[in-house]
Amino acid sequence: MSTMTIAKAINLGLRRALQADPKVLIAGEDVGKLGGVFRITEGLQAEFGTNRVIDSPLAESGIIGTAVGLTMRGYRVVAEIQFDGFVFPAFDQLVTQVAKLHARTAGRQPMPMVVRIPYGGGIGAVEHHSESPEAYFCHTPGLKVVTPSSPHDAHWMIQQAVASPDPVIFLEPKRRYHVKGEVNVEQRPAPMHQAGILRQGTDATLIAWGPMVRTCLDAAAVAAEEGTSVEVIDLRSLAPIDWVSLAASVRRTRRAIVVHEAPRTLGLGAEIAARLHEDLFYDMESPVLRVTGYDIPYPPSRLEDEFLPSADRILDALDRSLAW
């Protein structure tokens, strides 16, 4: 058992993936000599060489296009997009090539590649550096989408993503990079697409992922002081979603609140709410509520605390759910 940050846990997971399979490559802007803008790949080029940890040109479409070609030649590429808002020049490659090639070739051409994307706000950044684009990718059949919220999950899920036979969008909650936690490097990991119950409760279920998991745990702790028992689920996998675990929790607590940073309209929370209403309508005591970002472009850094869901906003939604 070791204590480390999420950033260090991903670095260690990538190192183990490179050691385990000589066909694993890492590519992206500044991932080699610099170690990435967040230093996630620090030291890997020195250890594995410039042919396996590759500094790419400043061209996201080129990074993903090259990764597609290398994957078709038998490599397993981990491509880094430096910031969430920079992924859109590569969006065409991801949704029309990466997501479709396996089906287009009737299963003859798998796409075992990973696209790492630091995402979310809370770091005081400028425009295009604080987006939450998960819904775009979850809407695209053929892509798996996962996001860890703890060092232990980060360490194991990056290795599971690299080993997956399908393309994986690996979303990293950048404002949580320096959160520390225990990592058991020998423990058998949970399945990559299984949700995790981080706190058990009986009165309501909070459903979150990535950067919002910590916020929900904080809200649940405050609620407990006020006599309300809240269950907190870390979704972990956004595509596919572990509907079995979600349904089991909401069937127990009879209330659900979905929390995410992305804007509300057509966000992933809408799909979760719709599915829970369809499947558990007669089990629930109140409608599924959503606590999200607002339907505006991500604001300047001085205003982002007003945009991002807070523990207070979550507790307000909890009060409304309990009073229904």
Image (tube, rainbow, N blue to C red):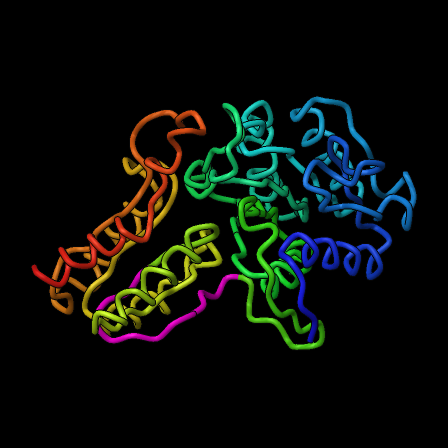
Would you say 104 lies left or right of 51 here?
Answer: left
In the image, residue 117 lies at what x, y percent? Answer: 59, 40
Which of the pair 63/128 is nearer the observer?
128
> In what quadrant of the picture does the N terminus appear?
bottom right
Would you say 46 lies left or right of 203 here?
Answer: right
Which of the pair 253/225 is nearer the observer?
225
Indicate the quadrant where residue 187 lies.
bottom right
In the image, residue 88 lies at what x, y percent? Answer: 54, 26
Image position of 13 with respect to 211: above or below:
below
Indicate the quadrant where residue 305 lies.
top left
Within the magenta stretch, is there residue 241?
no
In the image, residue 199 lies at what x, y percent? Answer: 38, 72
Image position of 210 with respect to 308: above or below:
below
Q: Give the range drawn in magenta.
A: 193-206
In the image, residue 286 lies at what x, y percent? Answer: 12, 60
Query: Which residue is rendered at x = 52% and y = 57% of the image?
Result: 149
Query: Which residue is rendered at x = 85% and y = 36% of the image?
Result: 33
Query: Which residue is rendered at x = 51% and y = 49% of the image?
Result: 145
Indicate the quadrant where residue 257 lies.
bottom left
Would you say 209 lies left or right of 307 here?
Answer: right
Image position of 258 with respect to 174: above or below:
below
Within the magenta stretch, is there residue 200?
yes
> In what quadrant of the picture does the C terminus appear?
bottom left
Would you say 36 lies left or right of 172 here?
Answer: right
